[in-house]
Image (cartoon, rainbow, N blue to C red):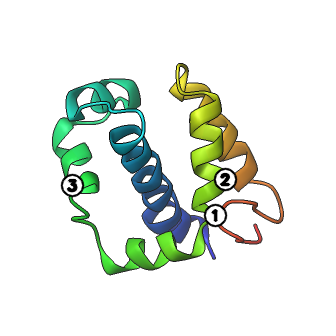
Amino acid sequence: MDYYNIAKKVVPAIYSVIIEYMYKELNMNEAEIAKRLNITQAAVSKYINKKYSKAIEEERKRINADRLREITNKYKDKIDIAICTICQETMKFNCKISGVKI
């Protein structure tokens, strides 16, 4: 998988899991999530309502959502650290999140 596909599929799939977790498990509203992730509330709404491409949905099936939730929960008060940790794991040669070999 090339970096273009990582940007178009893997990263949005990771965001979809994180946003779903923040919304359902941490009981954060769309505005809070948007502010914490520095994205628009409209983008958060699309993720919550699963309004993303089939390619992202397929990637969601491949990623290790349990690991994402574990990291997000560990750093729930510092979501930027959670995202950095997820990114570091994703960029390892044998990605623990998506299984992609980079």
Query: Left or right: 36 with respect to 45?
Result: right
Question: Which residue carries the number 2 mark?
Answer: 67
Farthest residue to the top: give it.
Answer: 77
Locate the C terminus and report the quarter of the image it occupies: bottom right
Residue drawn at x 38%, y 25% as measured from the top left: 36
Q: How far across and how far down the image is residue 63, in percent? A: 59, 67
Residue drawn at x 38%, y 45% as measured from the top left: 19
Question: Which residue carries the number 3 mark?
Answer: 46
User: Mark 2 belongs to which amino acid?
Assistant: Arg
Q: Comparing marks 3 and 2, which lies closer to the viewer?
A: 2
Q: 1 and 40: which one is in front?
A: 40
Q: CA distance from mark 1 to mark 2?
A: 5 Å
Q: Residues within 10 Å of mark 2 (few under 14, many from 20)?
A: few
Question: Which residue carries the number 1 mark?
Answer: 64
In the rendered view, tell whether residue 95 sits above or below residue 75.
below
Q: CA distance from mark 3 to mark 2?
A: 23 Å
Mark 3 vs 1, N-terminal side = 3
Mark 3 vs 2, N-terminal side = 3
In the rendered view, tell whether residue 30 sits above or below residue 69.
above
Q: How far across and how far down the image is residue 74, in percent? A: 65, 31
Q: Are marks 3 and 1 in contact (CB under 8 Å)?
A: no
Element at label 1: loop
Residue drawn at x 21%, y 28% as measured from the top left: 31
Q: How far across and how far down the image is residue 54, in percent? A: 33, 80
Residue drawn at x 31%, y 30% as measured from the top left: 28
User: Mark 1 belongs to which amino acid?
Assistant: Asn
Q: Are marks 3 and 2 in contact (CB under 8 Å)?
A: no
Query: Left or right: 34 with respect to 95?
Result: left
Query: Left or right: 3 with respect to 102?
Result: left
- Please identify the quarter of the rendering in which residue 52 is found: bottom left
Q: Comparing marks 3 and 1, which lies closer to the viewer?
A: 1
